[in-house]
Image (tube, helix red, strand yellow):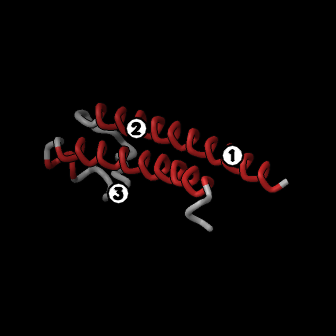
Amino acid sequence: MMQDNPIVLLLGVFFALFLGGRGWRRRKLKRAVRDLPTRLQRMIGEEPGFEPPAEVPEGLQGYVALYGRSARVMYGIWALAFGWLGYVIYLWLGTMG
């Protein structure tokens, strides 16, 4: 049945990468916001997005850079996850024919 199918395990790797990338970014941003002074914390968007303001005041440049870098890392992990999903679908279609 389902538990004997290796495709389920391979799909689990996809979900682990996808959710892990999103969770990693959320933790990284949450920690960075926590370390900011209260005045700057109030300028940042609500959790879970923590979007920086459109006009970046002095003192938030580091956070804005981290926000962009963490997004690129998360999207890279997501690209890897979707590449893996494509490979799993390829394997699955190969076993059907």
Residue 2 percent coordinates (x, y): 60, 66
Q: Disc 2 to disc 3, how far (Cα)?
A: 14 Å
Residue position for label 3:
48
Residue 50 percent coordinates (x, y): 33, 51
Report the disc number at residue 86: 1
Say which label, 1 or 3, has the lower sequence index: 3
Instruction: Say which amino acid is labelled 2.
Output: Ser
Mark 3: few/some/many CA within 10 Å (<14, 14-19, 20+): few
Which of discs 1 and 2 lies nearer the camera? The answer is 1
Residue 23 percent coordinates (x, y): 37, 50
Instruction: Say which amino acid is labelled 3.
Output: Pro
Front-lying residue, 88 or 4: 4
Q: Secondary structure at mark 3?
A: loop
Q: Disc 1 to disc 2, how far (Cα)?
A: 24 Å
Query: Left or right: where does residue 49 sit relative to residue 81?
Result: left
Q: Disc 1 to disc 3, how far (Cα)?
A: 28 Å
Name the residue rendered at 29%, 47% in the picture.
Answer: 27
Residue position for label 2:
70
Query: Left or right: where does residue 4 sit relative to residue 87?
Result: left
Q: Secondary structure at mark 2?
A: helix
Mark 1: few/some/many CA within 10 Å (<14, 14-19, 20+): few
Say which label, 1 or 2, has the lower sequence index: 2
- Image quarter where the N terminus lies is bottom right
Q: Is residue 16 above or below residue 62?
A: below
Q: Secondary structure at mark 1?
A: helix
